[in-house]
Amino acid sequence: MPRVAVVTGGTRGIGRAISAALKDGGYHVAAVYGGDDEAAQQFKADSGIPVYKFDVGVFTACADGVKAIETALGPVEILVNNAGITRDTTMHRMSFEQWNAVIQTNLTSCFNMSRQVIEGMRARGFGRIVNIGSINGQAGQFGQTNYAAAKAGMQGFTKSLAQEGAARGITVNLVAPGYVETDMVRAMPADVLEKIVARIPVGRLGKAEDIARAVLFLVADGAGFITGSTLSVNGGQHMY
Ligand code: CAA
């Protein structure tokens, strides 16, 4: 039986490429999304991948959502915590809402989703969790105290859960993308983005497929000795 993989934020941007790559790799994929129905329905029509709408920032919504996925597809053996948002602004202008929305959607979601699947993974002796971090969680970024804190938090989460899962066949890793051609990056001020691209040694923005390739590598059955690691995919922008 093909393994069942869940990708949060799985219908757009990096998540869309991860969902598609997993499907091409022979996995049964469920793509979770939070808001954009039109994009999700288009993705479903294009890819044939089922989509599930719920807010990964809300624990009970994740419990219900994962239950629905498992009823339809079977036990979740691979989880990709990819869903993320930005609310970029400097600290002296940041509201509590801007802080909290990013922490909840980007970091608390990792607990909310992993908690739903971890007991089953432990019982079956197999699991793959990949968290999508960011170069900005590693290096920090002007205007992103909320986002960088969440992404750095994901790194600590990854290393801790990796230790807990290691003896049960569960690996937990973090992929840290750099600046990738997505709506999130396209929304940045053009002059700011231009300066950032100038500092990428490879000389271009990443493609969503560049990130998906790394995820596919980490979720493979043969990747059982890789756990607690951070795989940077950033065109050489930050070597860490
Ligand atoms: N370092 C130092 N100073 C900086 C700076 C930086 N990186 N960026 C801006 N500044 C300075 C500016 O030069 C400016 O100085 P002056 O007033 O002396 O001219 C001052 O800070 C204010 O800058 P802005 O005019 O840009 O201020 P703003 O309030 O209009 O915007 C901002 C602030 C919203 C944070 C804007 O700078 C911004 O959007 N920055 C980009 C943040 C970013 O990289 N986000 C990544 C989004 S993609 C993503 O997150 C995916 C991923 O994982 C990589």
Image (cartoon, rainbow, N blue to C red):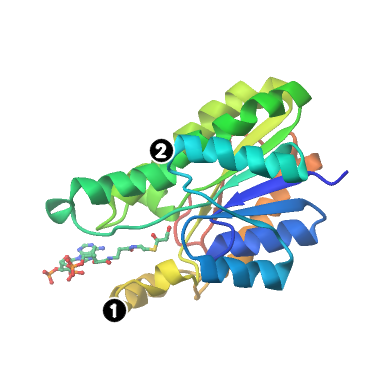
Identity of the residue drawn at 28% across and 59% down:
88
Q: Position of 124 compared to 218: left or right?
A: right
Relative image position of residue 28 (x, y in whole percent): 77, 51
Disc 1 residue type?
A: Asp
Q: Quadrant of residue 90?
A: bottom left
How many numbered dots are placed on residues in this image? 2
| Residue underneath mark 1 | 191
- In percent of the image, x 67 and y 66: which residue is there? 44
In the rendered structure, the answer to whether residue 35 lies left or right of residue 173 reads left
Q: Looking at the image, is 115 positioned above or below residue 19?
A: above
Residue 176 placement (x, y as % from top left) = 51, 51
Percent across and percent down for residue 217 are 72, 50
Q: In the displayed structure, does residue 23 sit left or right of residue 147?
A: right
Residue at x 30%, y 57% (from the top left corner): 87
Residue beneath label 2, please? 153
Pointer 1 local density, CA inside 10 Å: few below 14, some 14–19, many at least 20? few
- Ligand 1 image position (quadrant): bottom left
